[in-house]
């Protein structure tokens, strides 16, 4: 969607000094760059957030009309009264607004935010239109840790290692989607939203699949307000370090994890001792989510079971397995040994195996090999 930024940076993850260079392009050899603030008055809540997004989209459209090829969406302007708009929301809002205006291909979107820090954050931002992302807070933290000796390399090496790791993680994610270049992933929004209200998705994430409802703009504004209040408390409180939260590692007073020390220990004991009673205790911990929700099915209640179907009305095992078939996995996706094992298993069951290959090319030798396996394995 944008060839300008691609010609200036080698990675979609850029350093703080590279961000300054992009900003300094304004007026150089015909380049136009403009920084747009992605903040809103936190006291105004949902209405303030909605107005800030509308204003941001209008400013972006006006900048493109004036010939700006680079739009920098920056949340550096936050303070005690202004909170940052979530970077994905601001990026997606501008991206889709320009698409509706028919001017999206005239400019690049560069996100300058303290929010992105892990691979998934960058995948989302690039998938919703960001040409480059500057995670300035993550880079500043890395510099501080290197300066304090917590990281045993110099600051420059630590920054390079971080951006290299994010870039490799990004490539790994897009390759699993069958995409080979970041440019093809850019703006593709190959995601499904879970827990977002349809009104929010339709306006700011248009075209994204969303099968269940959830958080609306008011809910997002409330979450931002809570985070902002922790950063700017009404009175100074003694605090040693940041609250880890427990999002990644289990903490007794942090976020609830479905698989925690208690549930894992129950499963291990049940498997080692072959105790069905202990397994039922483990199953109860996993299935009972009345206190701490952890999965979508935890929001549902199962209806009372219907009367059992008489066995004489149920197909025999020999008839059922005839409809078993393996997925169409090509020779390049799994190994020769895996293909042979699947073919042998389906032949013995009376089911069907699928090489996943077209009738041409190197699939022919594979089909011959599998036919030979069928002869050796025998069929029922």
Image (spheres, rainbow, N blue to C red):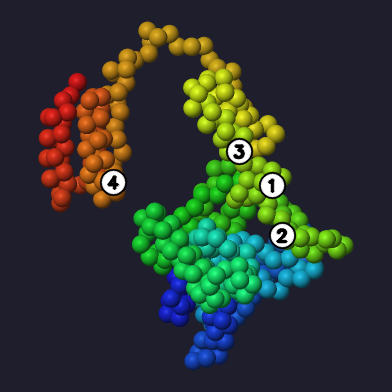
Badge 1 is on which residue?
A: 254
Is residue 343 shown left or right of residue 271? left
Q: Is residue 158 left or right of residue 237?
A: left
Q: Earlier in the sequence, mark 3 or mark 2?
A: 2
Q: Name the N-terminal-most of marks 4 and 1.
A: 1
Q: Which residue is mark 2?
A: 242
Q: Mark 3 near mark 2, Cβ–Cβ under 8 Å?
A: no
Mark 3 or mark 1: whose residue is earlier in sequence: 1
Mark 3 or 2: the one toward you = 3
The residue indicated by pointer 4 is: 334
Identify the residue at image location x=40%, y=54%. 177
Q: Position of residue 50 (x, y in %)?
A: 70, 61
Q: Is residue 253 left or right of residue 29?
A: right
Determine the image quadrant of residue 92. Answer: bottom right
185 lies above or below 249:
below
Residue 16 coordinates in the image, percent (x, y): 58, 78
Q: Could you tell me which secondary element the residue under label 4 belongs to?
A: loop
């Amino acid at each position: 969607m944008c060839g300008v930024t691609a010609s200036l940076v080698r990675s979609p993850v850029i350093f703080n000094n590279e961000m300054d260079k992009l900003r300094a392009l304004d007026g150089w050899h015909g380049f136009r760059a403009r920084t747009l603030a992605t903040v809103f008055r936190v006291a105004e809540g949902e209405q303030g957030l909605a107005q800030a997004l509308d204003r941001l989209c209008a400013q972006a459209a006006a900048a493109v009309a004036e010939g700006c090829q680079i739009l920098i969406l920056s949340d550096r302007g936050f303070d005690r009264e202004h909170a940052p708009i979530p970077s994905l929301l601001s990026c997606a809002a501008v991206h889709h607004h320009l698409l509706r205006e028919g001017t999206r291909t005239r400019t690049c979107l560069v996100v300058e935010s303290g929010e992105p820090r892990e691979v998934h954050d960058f995948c989302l931002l690039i998938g919703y239109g960001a040409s480059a992302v500057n995670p300035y807070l993550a880079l500043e933290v890395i510099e501080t840790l290197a300066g304090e000796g917590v990281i045993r390399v110099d600051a420059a090496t630590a920054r390079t290692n971080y951006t290299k790791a994010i870039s490799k993680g990004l490539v790994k994610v897009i390759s699993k989607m069958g995409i080979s270049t970041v440019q093809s992933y850019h703006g593709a929004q190959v995601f499904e939203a879970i827990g977002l209200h349809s009104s929010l998705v339709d306006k700011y994430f248009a075209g994204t699949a969303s099968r269940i409802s959830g958080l609306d703009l008011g809910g997002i504004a409330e979450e931002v307000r809570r985070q902002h209040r922790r950063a700017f408390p009404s009175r100074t409180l003694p605090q040693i370090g940041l609250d880890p939260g427990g999002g990644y590692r289990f903490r007794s007073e942090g976020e609830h994890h479905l698989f925690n020390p208690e549930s894992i220990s129950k499963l291990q004991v049940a498997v080692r001792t072959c105790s069905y009673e202990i397994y039922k205790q483990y199953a109860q911990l996993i299935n009972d989510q009345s206190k701490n929700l952890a999965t979508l099915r935890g929001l549902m209640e199962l209806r009372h079971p219907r009367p059992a179907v008489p066995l004489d009305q149920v197909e025999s095992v020999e008839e059922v397995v005839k409809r078993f078939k393996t997925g169409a996995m090509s020779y390049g996706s799994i190994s020769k040994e895996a293909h042979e094992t699947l073919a042998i298993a389906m032949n013995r069951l009376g089911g069907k195996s699928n090489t996943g290959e077209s009738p041409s090319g190197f699939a022919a030798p594979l089909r011959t090999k599998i036919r030979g396996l069928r002869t050796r394995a025998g069929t029922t």
